[in-house]
Image (cartoon, rainbow, N blue to C red):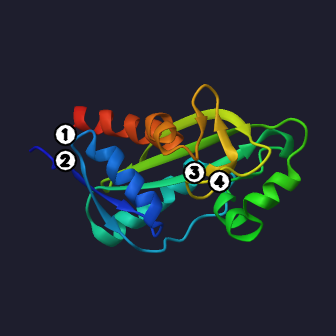
Amino acid sequence: MRRSSEVVFATTNANKYAEARGILAGFGIRARRLRRTLAEPQSTSLQVIAAAKARLAFSICRRPVVAEDAGLFVESLGGFPGPYSSYIASTIGNAGILRLVGRDRSARFVSVAAYCDGRTPRTFTGVVRGSISRREAGGGWGFDPIFRADGAGPYSDAGAKARSSHRVLALGRFARWYLRNL
């Protein structure tokens, strides 16, 4: 039996949902939103967190579901904020990261999309290497105004981010797998 090319995307973040919906639509996959705060395990692993959220979201909606977790990993800060990015963005924000970052400004954005259809979740990872800028550039949300992707420019440039973001890579990997396995 052929599954639908529709999935539920679990997030309370309207920006993340809009971004994910657009990415998946590019593959012909329709994303509906489950707007529910999901308990996250305390973990330093984005894979563990995303898989747990996908499992929990599936238990709520009983439909094929994708949950995503992402983090900004700054090398000079030992990978901080990593899986704590959402909390750090809401507390010290971009200005706080700019104050903390050292001479080594290298960083990476990592996204993990986890898919669950009632079985063991599958995870798909996207990584974009880059650096932390010296000051905020307008546009974007979250850490976008302070992240510059190697070879692609600032994430605050929506075009650059839309072509090659960590989320584009992770959800693209998911979408190709999903469509092959419908």
Q: How far across and down, in percent of the image, does residue 144 sit?
A: 61, 50
Cα distance, mark 4 to mark 3? 11 Å
Q: Secondary structure at mark 1?
A: loop
Measuring 39% from the left and 72% from the top, which residue is drawn there?
A: 35
Discs 3, 1 touching: Cβ within 8 Å: no
The residue under label 2 is which amino acid type? Ser
Query: In the image, what residue type sits under mark 4?
Result: Phe
- Quick check: 3 left or right of 35? left
Q: Depth check: give the residue in front, 181 or 75.
A: 75
Disc 2 to disc 3, C-alpha distance: 24 Å
Q: Is residue 60 above or below residue 31?
A: below
State which mark lies toward you, 2 or 4.
Answer: 4
Residue behind mark 4: 143
For numbered disc 2, what is the local secondary structure? loop
**Helix, strand or loop under label 3:** strand
Proximity of marks 2 and 1: CB atoms separated by less than 8 Å:
yes
Pick whichever of labels 4 and 3 is earlier in the sequence. 3
Q: Nearer the viewer, residue 116 or 79?
A: 79
| Front of the two marks 2 and 1 | 2
In the picture of the structure, the residue carrying the numbered disc 2 is: 5
The type of residue carrying mark 3 is Ala
Q: Earlier in the sequence, mark 2 or mark 4?
A: 2
Q: For this rendering, which residue is in front, 32 or 133?
A: 133
Q: Which residue is mark 3?
A: 70
The disc, 1 or 4, on the residue closer to the chain's N-terminal end is 4
Q: Which residue is mark 1?
A: 182
Labels 1 & 4 near each other (Cβ < 8 A): no
The C terminus, quarter of image: top left
Q: Residues within 10 Å of mark 1 (few under 14, many from 20)?
A: few
> How far is the residue under mark 2 from the one under mark 1?
8 Å
Q: The disc labelled 1 sits on which kind of residue?
A: Leu
